């Protein structure tokens, strides 16, 4: 009697929501980013051409207005750069935004306060088991799904400008 092999195919569940974005050609690079807080979109461009748009992005718990002080839970507005990345952050990947700029520091200093810092574009908390958090929840960062931050991570080089509009 021959032994019978039994193969069972089970679908694998992803740990994070899949990106709603189409895949991009290998080697695609963004040269600037635009965040529109009121429309909740982050758009990556090459030249004047939009290459990808992320929707339903999340902000700090107090999303209206420009970040002024540490702990105000606002997301900055203005022109900054992507000036670093952290593959081992407490969130799924993170791209550092150059906040605070000189004007941000001067304003906070004049008020006797700290402007805060450590503002990133990142994914969901590493220990978060579910789909992307569906409300504003960061301390001022910009949050995407894990799949979307992975795609953005791959196309954004350090040093590119980011404009964050109200």
Image (tube, rainbow, N blue to C red):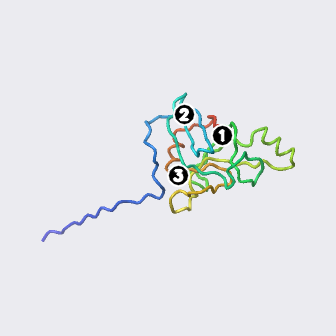
Dot 2: few (<14), some (14–19), or many (≥20) neighbours within 10 Å?
A: some
The answer to whether residue 56 is above or below residue 158 is below
Q: Is residue 126 visible?
A: yes
Q: Which mark is residue 165?
A: 1
Q: Residue furthest left?
A: 1
Pick whichever of labels 1 and 3 is earlier in the sequence: 3
Q: Is residue 108 left or right of residue 142?
A: right
Assign the C terminus to one quadrant of the image.
Answer: top right
Q: Position of residue 148 (x, y in %)?
A: 51, 47
Q: Is residue 149 visible?
A: no
Dot 3: few (<14), some (14–19), or many (≥20) neighbours within 10 Å?
A: many
Q: Secondary structure at mark 1?
A: strand
Dot 1: few (<14), some (14–19), or many (≥20) neighbours within 10 Å?
A: some
The answer to whether residue 48 is above or below residue 33 is above
Cα separation between marks 1 and 3: 21 Å
Cα separation between marks 2 and 1: 16 Å
Pick whichever of labels 3 and 2 is earlier in the sequence: 2
The answer to whether residue 46 is above or below residue 147 is above
- Reading the image, the residue beneath label 2 is 45
Q: Residue furthest front?
A: 38
């Amino acid at each position: 009697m021959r032994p019978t092999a039994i193969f069972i195919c089970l679908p694998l569940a992803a740990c994070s929501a899949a990106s709603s974005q189409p895949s991009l050609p290998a080697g695609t690079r963004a040269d600037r980013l635009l965040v529109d807080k009121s429309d909740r979109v982050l758009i990556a461009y090459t030249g004047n051409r939009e290459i990808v748009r992320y929707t339903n992005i999340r902000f700090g718990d107090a999303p209206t207005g420009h970040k002024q002080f540490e702990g105000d839970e606002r997301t900055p507005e203005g022109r900054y750069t992507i000036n670093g990345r952290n593959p081992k952050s407490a969130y799924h990947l993170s791209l550092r935004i150059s906040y605070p700029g000189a004007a941000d520091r001067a304003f906070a200093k004049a008020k006797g306060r700290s402007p805060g810092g450590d503002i990133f574009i990142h994914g969901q908390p590493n220990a978060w088991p579910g789909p992307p958090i569906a409300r504003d929840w960061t301390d001022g960062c910009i949050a995407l799904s894990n799949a979307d931050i992975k795609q953005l991570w791959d196309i954004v080089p350090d040093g590119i400008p980011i404009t964050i509009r109200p």
